[in-house]
Image (cartoon, grey):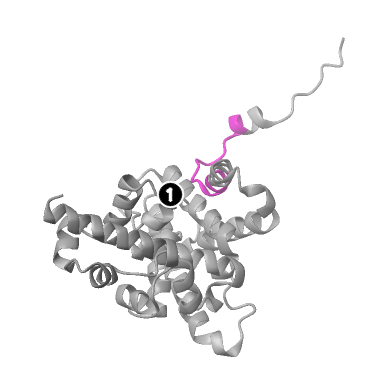
Amino acid sequence: MPQKQSRIHKALDTAEQLYRESGLAWSLADVARQSGVSRGTLYRRFGSKQGLLEALQKEREIAIDPRQLKPPRERILDALVEVSRGVGLAKATLEAISQVAQVGEATIYRYFGSRKGLLTAYADERTPRTVLQQLPLDGSADVSSALQQLIRMALLTWQDHGPFLLAGVTASDEEQEIVKHLLALEAQARKQLTLYFDSLVQRGTLEGDPELLTGALVGMIAGIAITQKPHLSGDIDRTAQILTHLFLEGCHAQETTTHSDLARTEPQQKDTTR
């Protein structure tokens, strides 16, 4: 066996042993140290830890959970969601998140800088803020489609962990700093939504006070999420479609009602002359 292939074979042996013993709690540096293969060789051959895991799956036919093949940053965000479902975002500790993500706490700090940084990234990438930040204020986006996407994301957020939207209800004193940060993120999201509604009102697409429109939409979503939560899991798309229709029908700018419009909507009188 050529020397280079022998080194790669030895690295795979080491990685397989580490994976079977400790899951993802190892690095390419650990493989290099235990196998005697340089880190440079490992990076040239596999590119990353994920590449090495994929090689184990392909060449050694090791069953690896697809979630473990995600980059560490994505695994950390996934772990935040999983941990917070049980305890709420304010109580989701970095220790618990690192255990679920199978990374060290130092890795979380490297990617996000702090616990607040992690929560901000989560809000930007996994909540309605994702949609809001992409909504153009020039009227170029279809309103119905944009709102339906926004409502769908909001319902998914509620389904995963309502504590993000109700962060300050049951927080203890030591969690107040995190709660304030979560509420500030939510306030920013509401402001973005209000600005979007203001642009629609200015163009005559909607009518009403933008802040009241924001409150109305948030209230509709929260009400459905709280009262219908057990039934949302398989029908979120349909629910988002219905809420979008109800909201736009109630707020859409319409022409002044005329006499002929009233005549068409009045119930027909029964003919009693027969």
Verify whether residue 115 appears in magenta. no
Residue at 52% in and 80% down = 179
154 shown above or below 61: below
Is 260 covered by the magenta stretch? Answer: yes
Q: Position of residue 52 (x, y in %)?
A: 28, 56
Badge 1, how many Cα within 10 Å: few under 14, some, many 20+?
few
> At 49% from the left edge and 86% from the top edge, which residue is drawn?
177
Instruction: Give the residue drawn at x 14%, y 58%.
Output: 44
In the rendered structure, the answer to whether residue 199 lies left or right of residue 248 reads left
- Quadrant of residue 113 within the rendered picture: bottom left
- Looking at the rendered structure, the kind of residue marked 1 is Ala
Q: How many marks?
A: 1
Point out residue 63 in the picture as x, y percentages from the top left corner: 43, 49
Q: Is residue 140 visible?
A: no
Q: Secondary structure at mark 1?
A: loop
Residue ID at (70%, 31%): 266
Q: Position of residue 181 (x, y in %)?
A: 46, 79
* Quadrant holding the C terminus: top right
Q: Is residue 256 above or below residue 193?
A: above
User: Residue reaching furthest top?
Assistant: 274
Where does the image place residue 98, in percent across and percent down from the top left? 44, 73
Give the magenta part as a residue range. Answer: 246-261
Q: Is residue 85 above or below residue 220?
A: below
Q: Which residue is mark 1?
A: 63
Residue found at the far bottom of this picture: 173
Query: Which residue is at the front of the view, 132 or 68?
Result: 68
Regarding residue 215, the answer to whether it shows in the image is yes
For this rendering, which residue is in front, 45 or 230?
45
